[in-house]
Amino acid sequence: MGRRTKTLSLFGIDTLENTVSAIEKWAGDVPPGGWVLGRGWIEREWQGERRFLTRWDVDRFTETKPLFMPRADGVSALVNTKALNMAGVKKETPDPEGGRFERDDDGELTGYVLGKAMEPFRAILPSETDAYIADNLLKGMRANAELGWTATHDAGMSWRELRLLQGLRERGLMAHRVYVAIPIDTAAPLIEHGPEQSDDGWIDVRAIKVFIDGTLGSRGAALLEPYEDAEHSGFMNRTTKAELMPVLEGALEQGIQIMTHVIGDRALRETLDWYQEAREALNPDEWASADLRWRLEHAQIISPADQARIEDMQVILSMQPSHAIGDLNFAPDRLGIERLRYAYPWRPMIDRGVPIVAGSDAPVEVGDPRIEFFAAITRSRLDGSAGDGWFPEYAVEREDALRMFTLWPAFASFQEQQRGSIEVGKQADLSIFDTNFMTAEPAEILTAKTIMTIVDGRVVYSASDGLVNNPANGSNGELP
């Protein structure tokens, strides 16, 4: 979230032409040789022409400046010719396993890269200083606190970022709690030493983040059947079974939670298979705990058979309501109406007794709890409209929506005895708004104002002061 404030944000731009104009304006302030960086374009929400951006859209004003612009989903990106040359990616370069360099009908690279094809460009991005990263963390937490978040689940924090976050906590500069998942490719120390938690409970490192497939918008989500608008069914573009199984077994032995990104129904089914296989590979007495609380992140398309398996295996679903009201603008094209019966099935899964964690998926989404709550209870666009295949009966009651943002996230981070509800003896983590989300008209929720955010009994944001306060002593701490 903090990094998003320092690069070009393309969220909310309404046409291809305006998107390119915004990139051109931003690039004009970048010196020759400097990187043109940003994020957030999403062609399916444009008016007029809706296609993926290409290098030819931006090459004319970035000839001397490499460009890297992830799509809103974060698992595909636009790069320009300069970046292609710097990364050594050529017309004859083969697609990596789990990724694709998009090509036109003549076989020319378009500059749209997907999945593991992003890695050559990430590898040559300029390095960031500790001060820059710490400032990003600080700005992100302050933005979250102002929106009313009292805790976040960070699904993929590096060890470097974690140590810098711990440094901020030691100086009293954190604005909310953070539950940390370490990416699978750097998770060996966590598996070796086990979970770690700060003495005051502000930082909890207990999970491993795994990526299995891509996203629906980029046609990278792995489906059981081909896309309606493409001749393929996506692909498993991140972690292989051979890489994952030892990690799952190590997690069982150490009491570590697994959080796996799955969007397509094929990716979800295979992940459930692997979860089950890992459980069966070890005797239960070799597990650190029988209370696993392993998670599926996003889980946007769930076949009926796998809905029952999730219930039986006691797997937690982490599903973001804003995904549905954004994706359903194009999901009928990708899936067809019939498959949408099994997409974003919040109400059916809650009826099965499956807890749903409803976060925001920021910075992929805006990160606003008002939008997320509205989406959960209406399953409609922000203007109240909906389209074919939106299945409004899958929206949730307000009481369940409240649990999706409070008690169930606490349960999903093993903290339901300490927080997640306002009860005597629990930690005082709560947000105060000027609007009652439980009784207001849905549209009124979208304009609600945060009055105060409290973490551990201390005010970390107050609208009257207009600032985020230092939880340790009430002052407005700043990085030197």
Image (tube, grey):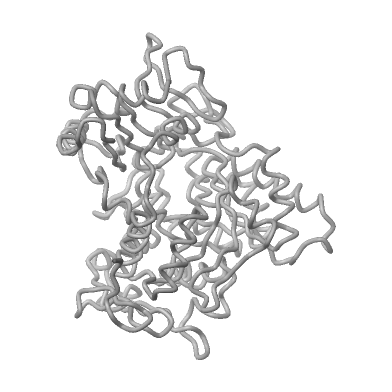
Q: Quadrant of residue 122?
A: top left
Residue positioned most to the front? 480
Compared to residue 400, the image places residue 161 above or below, namely: above
Q: Nearer the viewer, residue 81 or 10?
A: 81
Q: Nearer the viewer, residue 444 or 255?
A: 255
> Residue 335 location, x and y as percent?
46, 35
Residue positioned most to the bottom? 424
Q: Nearer the viewer, residue 399 or 452?
A: 452
352 on left or right of 477? right
User: Which residue is painted at 37% across and 47% down in the image?
Assistant: 128
420 on left or right of 370? right
> Residue 13 location, x and y as percent?
21, 42
> Residue 276 location, x and y as percent?
74, 50
Compared to residue 177, the image places residue 2 above or below, namely: above
Compared to residue 321, the image places residue 217 above or below, namely: above
Compared to residue 1, the image places residue 410 above or below, namely: below
* Viewport quadrant of the N terminus: bottom left
Q: Nearer the viewer, residue 391 or 210?
A: 210
> Residue 269 location, x and y as percent?
64, 43
User: Which residue is painted at 64% across and 45% down in the image?
Assistant: 271
User: Which residue is painted at 49% across and 57% down in the image?
Assistant: 346
Number of marks drawn: 0
* Viewport quadrant of the C terminus: bottom left
